[in-house]
């Protein structure tokens, strides 16, 4: 049996694991990553990148059709084969040599195989050929194993071989009829993508559409999905599923009604990849999300660092925020704090300190690439109220701006600013509209910077842009 020792061993080489290792090496320590599948993780091959590639063609076509002059130049529908080819390129054809080269140039060791914690600071890696390598970490083991699609216990569902987000993201063909269970981010994005590619789509949104966003966001997405011919069934719950010999999937709703489709996508959330990473060997619960402190150190039931503090968890697996950019933000904090602790340097773990992921709880940006795009950061009005803040909500119709009417004929959208009245700062911001994704970062900066509203008046948006919504919101708020 082979063995090796590094300062830090990272299990999982998704976007988060790669970035943890990078920070560790930049900090002067040695690091190895363990990967059982493809270096780059879910985001690169089955999530962010391929799904956005599936959506982009439809968005570009819509944009052209909304501008007279350009509209007349559009003479056909999406070229499905070309969209799928571009998606394949963005998924690097499900080959990870590019990312492996990046690891090499970054000085990070790669061990291919399934990583399993055997004891404190010791990780066993079992390769595809069954060979086992034992890795010992001098300072820390970081779990960055991510998450997988949750398949709920619905009678017959597993036997019906449903699609999860993986099969949707990597689809080789567009099904004639696609049914979707779920009304969250994956469900709405994939309904938008496949409707654009020609599927007849039915969404079974038991708990509503984008229920955690500002209500106008879900309403606008439902309206536009319905305009595209998608059947959005809010409140509909799948009771059982059966796939017939001819491939047809029948979903019997709890109401007794039946929905038929050629493929069924299950998009009801995620489950942590912790079932087989040896948590049981160190007294933690397999299949559980890993609870961490603000420096991303795994904590025990009492909230203290687990077993003296050698174990960290970053990215999806700690359930703080299931987004790539936020996981990478955590990765930078983990890498840096592991280095600081190893060198006996000061740990900056105060609010907004270098070694903590403070933004996870206050300023998480997210863009849902539906039509319209939903871009949000910070708290919704409902979440702010639930947190006990005294807030004022200011809304503005995005269509009522020179910038938006120039951007597209019939531009429809809305923006909401949530203000903490006691501190006179923005704590939440949501935009719904075509191409609003790139407007979001200004709101993130306003929230993270806790920029007082009276100072925001001096941040003048250029004319004629959609960003002028900031001025309108401030005018509506008053000074
Ligand atoms: C359909 C879809 C679309 C998404 N779109 C976006 C988006 O547009 N923007 C965004 O910010 N986020 C998006 N997300 C979320 C994003 O994909 C995740 O937040 C991100 O991938 C998490 O990164 P991670 O490194 O924590 O985990 P992962 O990307 O899941 O990587 C974990 C890695 O660990 C490996 N691994 C697991 N167990 C072991 C083991 N025992 N041994 C060795 N290796 C192991 C896995 O093979 C994997 O490579 C999307 C998610 C889905 C499902
Ligand atoms: N653009 C992006 O940023 C992006 C895109 C896709 C995914 N993601 C990430 O991936 C994660 C997973 O996405 P997701 O859409 O699977 O999860 P989600 O949590 O966004 O939505 C799942 C939805 O399914 C509903 N649901 C749960 N159980 C159900 C059941 N049995 N029947 C019907 N509905 C049920 C939930 O109420 C919820 O609304 C998200 O948390 C998100 O962070 C991000």
Image (cartoon, grey):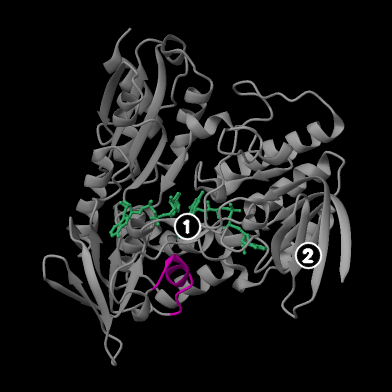
Q: Is residue 42 magenta?
A: no
| Foreground residue among 134 and 469 | 134
Q: Quadrant of residue 407?
A: top left
Circle number at residue 271: 1
Please state the horizontal and vertical placement of residue 108, each as a whole percent of the image.
Answer: 81, 55
Mark 2 vs mark 1: give the one in front: 1
Q: Is residue 70 visible?
A: no
Q: Quadrant of residue 472?
A: top left
Q: Residues within 10 Å of mark 2 (few under 14, many from 20)?
A: many
| Foreground residue among 81 and 352 | 352
Q: Is residue 219 left or right of residue 336?
A: left
Q: Is residue 40 visible?
A: yes
Q: Residues within 10 Å of mark 1 (few under 14, many from 20)?
A: some
Circle number at residue 111: 2
Highlighted range, magenta = 163-172
Please state the horizontal and vertical placement of residue 310, each as a whole percent of the image.
Answer: 74, 42
Question: Which residue lies at the image location 70% right of the left edge and 40% below the top edge?
Answer: 307
Q: Is residue 392 left or right of residue 170?
A: left
Q: Is residue 30 left or right of residue 224?
A: right
| Foreground residue among 456 and 351 | 351
Q: Is residue 168 magenta?
A: yes
Secondary structure of residue under mark 2: strand
């Amino acid at each position: 049996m082979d063995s090796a020792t590094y300062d830090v061993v990272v299990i999982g080489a998704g976007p988060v694991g790669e970035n943890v290792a990078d920070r560790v090496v930049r900090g002067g320590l040695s690091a190895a990553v363990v990967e059982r599948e493809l270096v780059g993780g879910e985001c690169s091959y089955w999530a962010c990148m391929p799904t956005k590639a599936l959506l982009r063609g439809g968005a570009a076509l819509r944009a052209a059709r909304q501008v007279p002059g350009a509209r007349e130049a559009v003479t056909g529908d999406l070229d499905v084969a070309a969209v799928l080819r571009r998606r394949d390129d963005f998924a690097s054809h499900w080959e990870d040599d590019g990312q492996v080269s990046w690891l090499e140039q970054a000085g990070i060791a790669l061990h291919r195989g399934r990583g399993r914690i055997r004891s404190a600071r010791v990780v066993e890696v079992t390769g595809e050929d069954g060979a086992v390598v034992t890795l010992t970490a001098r300072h820390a083991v970081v779990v960055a194993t991510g998450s997988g699609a949750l398949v709920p216990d619905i009678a017959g569902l597993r036997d019906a071989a449903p699609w999860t987000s993986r099969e949707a993201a990597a689809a080789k063909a567009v099904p004639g009829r696609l049914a979707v269970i779920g009304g969250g981010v994956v469900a709405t994005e994939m309904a938008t993508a496949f409707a654009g590619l020609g599927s007849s789509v039915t969404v079974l949104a038991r708990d509503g559409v984008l229920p955690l966003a500002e209500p106008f966001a879900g309403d606008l997405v439902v309206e536009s999905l319905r305009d595209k011919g998608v059947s959005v069934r809010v409140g509909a719950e799948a009771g059982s599923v059966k796939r017939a010999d001819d491939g047809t999937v029948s979903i019997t709703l709890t109401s007794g009604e039946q929905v038929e489709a050629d493929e069924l996508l299950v998009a009801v959330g995620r489950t942590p990849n912790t079932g087989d990473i040896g948590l049981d060997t160190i007294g933690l619960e397999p299949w559980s999300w890993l609870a961490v402190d603000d420096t991303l150190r795994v904590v025990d039931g009492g909230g203290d660092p687990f077993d003296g503090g050698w174990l960290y968890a970053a990215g999806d697996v700690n359930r703080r925020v299931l987004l790539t950019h936020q996981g990478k933000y955590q990765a930078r904090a983990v890498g840096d704090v592991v280095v600081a602790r190893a060198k006996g340097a000061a740990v900056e773990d105060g609010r907004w300190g270098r070694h903590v992921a403070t933004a996870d709880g206050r300023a998480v940006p997210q863009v849902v690439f539906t039509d319209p795009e939903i871009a949000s950061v910070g708290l919704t009005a409902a979440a702010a109220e639930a947190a006990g803040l005294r807030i004022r909500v200011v809304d503005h119709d995005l269509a009522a701006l020179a910038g938006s009417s120039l951007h597209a004929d019939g531009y429809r959208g809305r923006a909401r600013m949530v203000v903490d009245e006691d501190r006179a700062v923005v704590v939440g911001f949501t935009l719904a509209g075509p191409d609003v994704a790139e407007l979001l970062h200004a709101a993130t900066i306003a929230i993270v910077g806790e920029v007082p509203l009276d100072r925001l008046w001096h941040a003048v948006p250029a004319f004629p842009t959609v960003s002028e919504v900031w001025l309108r919101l401030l005018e509506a708020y008053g000074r």
